[in-house]
Amino acid sequence: MLHTHTHRRDWLRLASAGVLGGSMCRWFPAFAEEAAADPKRKRACILLWMSGGPSQIDTFDPKPGHENGGEFEAIDTSVPGIQVCEHLPGVAKQMERMAIIRSMSTKEGDHTRATYLAHTGYLPQGPIRYPTLGSLFSKELGSLDADLPNFVSVAPNRFISPGAFGPGFLGPQYAPLVVGDPGVTPNPQMAEQTNLSVRNIELPEGVDFSQSDARLELLDVLETGFQESRRAMPVESHRTAYEKAVKMMRSSAVGAFKFEDEAPELRDAYGRNPFGDACLLARRLVERGVPFIEVSLNGVQGNAGIGWDTHNDNFNQVQQLCGVLDPAWSTLLEDLDGRGMLDSTLVVWMGEFGRTPGIVSDRTGRDHFPAAWSTVLCGGGIQGGQVIGASSEDGMTIVDRPVSMPDFLATLCLALGLDPQKQNMSNVGRPIRLADPEASPITEIIG
Amino acid sequence: MATRNWWCTAIIALILSGAVPKCTAAQSTENSSSVDTIAAEIDRLIAKKWEADGNEPAGLSSDEEFIRRVFLDITGRIPPASDVRDFRDDASPDKRRRLVERLLASPTYIVHYTNLWRAAMLPEADADQQIRFFLPGFEAWLRSRLAENRNFAEIAREVLTLPVDAQDVQGFNQPETATPVAFYRAKEGKPENLAAATSRIFLGVRIECAQCHDHPFDDWKQDEFWGYAAFFAGVRPATAGMPDGPAPPPNNRSLMVPGTDRVVSARFLGGDEAEFSRTSSPRDVLADWFVSQENPFFARAAVNRIWAHHFGVGLVDPLDDFSTLNPPSHPELLDVLASAFVENGYDFKFMIRAITASRTYQLTSELTHESQDTPRSFARMPVRAMTPEQIFDSLAQAVGYRQPFNPEEALNFNNDPARQEFLETFRNEADSPTERASTILQALQLMNGEFIAGATDLTDSQTLAAVIDAPFLDTNEKVEALFLATLARGPSPVEAEKFGTYVASGGPTQDEQNALSDVFWALLNSSEFLMNH
């Protein structure tokens, strides 16, 4: 009698198709036909999120010789004519895999709104709840029957902009599996060791799989009755979460979260710190078919959650951050390449905005600056070794090819082989495209 | 039969003792005529919109549904099984209202409302360890105010006008002193942060977007934001190191708009520049304006929040986003509630009595017609996710876990590691209660985590052991006891049959006791247990 809501009803279909006899209950349906329907391996995306807004001049758009250039030297890269900051030596050696966009131009200088814009491509407006990039892309790239969640987010600092990190109108089955500590609570003891494992993934002591199956069957009786009489989104979401959790518990793919089989030298190369470990985890997840991983660099020890927000002591802070970023990122690219996965994996480096070219002398800081800043794309789908756009000599304005956030996200779509104009139905009953229809992607960057 | 029922009630009461004191006589009925009037107005205005929109309302909730809901809404936890039995057996016509009175008089009401208002006023404590350090003092303050049943205007005034010096917003102070100073500390004593927070919490207006520029899609202008912020210009902001430069004079009332050379003076939100004597404190003047006739926001924002606590969705929703682009679903009702709130001295308990007495609140959450699907029609009770505190406190109630603190004591309140772990996992900043997304980690914690493992372990568990050991209970009655302890209802015929057969068969372990533990596990993991409905 109650048959509307066709999307997000997948579990209903699964339930009704559930196996009748035997001990197989409806919590672990067979999805084989769906998996078979997708023979070609799809692309993956790793988003390296720089929380707080990194300084473009002190990273990828150096201004040597200009007073706005600051304390750092520019160094040559593996591509003649392209220079980056001296504290990114590892990344500099891989410039042929990377395209720098030096002409990002947005209008949002507030962390919350800018983080939302960069994660969804839209500004928060009215009741529409836009999905975060990971949810949006993993829905396209992943399959619902995967053993691991299609979207894993390591240490997101959601507090800065809660709406920017969720699945929005796509619904809870596209929500990320979150692991790791965002580091917003400076706690030296916890920062010493990285914990990227999935908590409570093992059955409790004394309970084996047959008892676990029996319990899930009892739960299914309760859920079916409640769902029939009390249809509602939180009830549905509960079911989705349990289905995914059960599937993950029973999968060997969960070994992705344990690093025992990695060579110590490789772990050293990534850097044995939360961000380095998270980048290694990202590779291990891509290897196991997870299509979207977001890794946040929220700061080095001691700064609370938005480490790139260098209003004070900019140069020391940026140098420390680069000391963590550079080895992890460059090792990630080499590692992916060594395993033949870089061609199908897009790696994105971005924050929510850039920082003022002018240095605030009394605190040696740089403030929020959305007018002219940089992002980097590398790996699969990208024509590396090039710079897109340019900022003026003093870094204050864009002089060539301004790129808006919608333009940027439409570019990501193309690099991942997705149609930016593809529509999803939103929570307000209006279809929303992957990227704003006004967006013009940077087609010359697509490889 | 009668003996057996008594036995069961007694034993469940023994092991599941709630902190709610018994009190059979109706209390505090001085506002009852007014409560009735407002409850009737709620029903009239909600029904008016059903008619206009073609909604078919659901029927009245069962007693089991009502007692569970009202326990969760007022005390933040599910009822003990014994209360469910007593309430079901009580034949008096005013039992729902008497229950509300009893709950409003319980210490758990104070604890629950402290949690709700703490989350609204000091959300920073969820993520920031340094702010969390000040929670005991802040919660002690809030709890004492609620215990004294101070009205909301007094609470807001105390926050707005609190004397603060540099030490308060910056340095170390006694964390256990009952004071709302953590509010200033969390906002770093900055006028712009205090402006954004007070406007959002007490006025339901998100003006912070106008901080850097005119609001892109609303009427707020940048100078209006800074004009409002100027009421806090006398508070000394926290700085990175030691405070530098002289403190601003406490009565300072003007600010320079950053990035401009414009100086703005204290100005009421949506109103004119405030005229007041040089010797008056700007924050006192602002507090006066909050509760004045000219302020269109304060009472509306407060009643909207209380409404949202009872329905999971506000009349204006999101509940702190009053804006021309986000109109209320029932504007007339919002006005009626706001006036009643003012007339009754900003008394939370009055609003709770009126809302819970309405038929609208007492509707079932069962979906009986398609047109009830939109939560904002209130044509059935929306199914809502619980707060993290509600989840843990309900689990504690269901499994017979004794939380290692006294709810009436200020200190050591939130320090139970088991509780902390749940609060951490179930925290959700993003979704409204009617749209809450569950996560894989939440599911894993309930399925495999230590707490539930203990509660369903035959040697460690409290509730389970008591049920297993209860003499005179047959298998079906044991199953029923577990249902009552978790879902506040007995099993449906289908459930009774399936669960009864399962337990009798002993499940895969061929052991009736293990099978009862499996039943308890399933109940604790069910969405019906984890939702307020």
Image: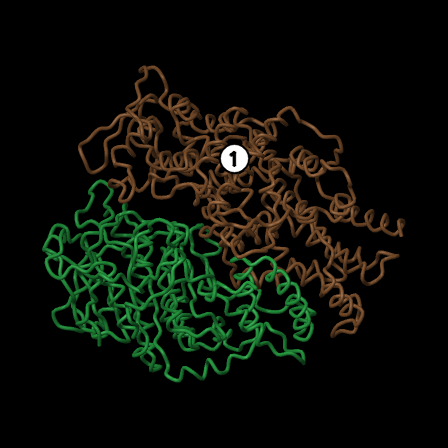
Chain colours: A green, B brown
Q: Quadrant of residue B295?
A: top left
Residue A227, position in %: x, y?
A: 59, 61
Would you say residue B172 is visible in this rendering?
Answer: no
| A426 displayed left or right of B56 | left
Q: Secondary structure at mark 1?
A: helix
Residue A365, position in %: x, y?
A: 24, 46
Q: Residue at x 75, y 46 (%)?
A: B88
Q: Quadrant of residue A24?
A: bottom right
Q: Is residue A432 above or below residue B305?
A: below
Q: Quadrant of the C terminus of chain A?
A: bottom left
Residue A76, position in %: x, y?
A: 16, 68
Q: Is residue B419 above or below residue A341?
A: above
Q: Nearer the viewer, residue A223 or B161?
A: A223
Amino acid type at image mark 1: Phe
Q: Residue at x 16, y 71 (%)?
A: A386
Q: Nearer the viewer, residue B223 or A394?
A: B223
Q: Is residue B234 above or below residue B430?
A: above
Would you say residue A228 is visible in this rendering?
Answer: yes
Q: Which residue is mark 1?
A: B138
Residue B310, position in %: x, y?
A: 56, 42
Q: Residue at x 59, y 72 (%)?
A: A27
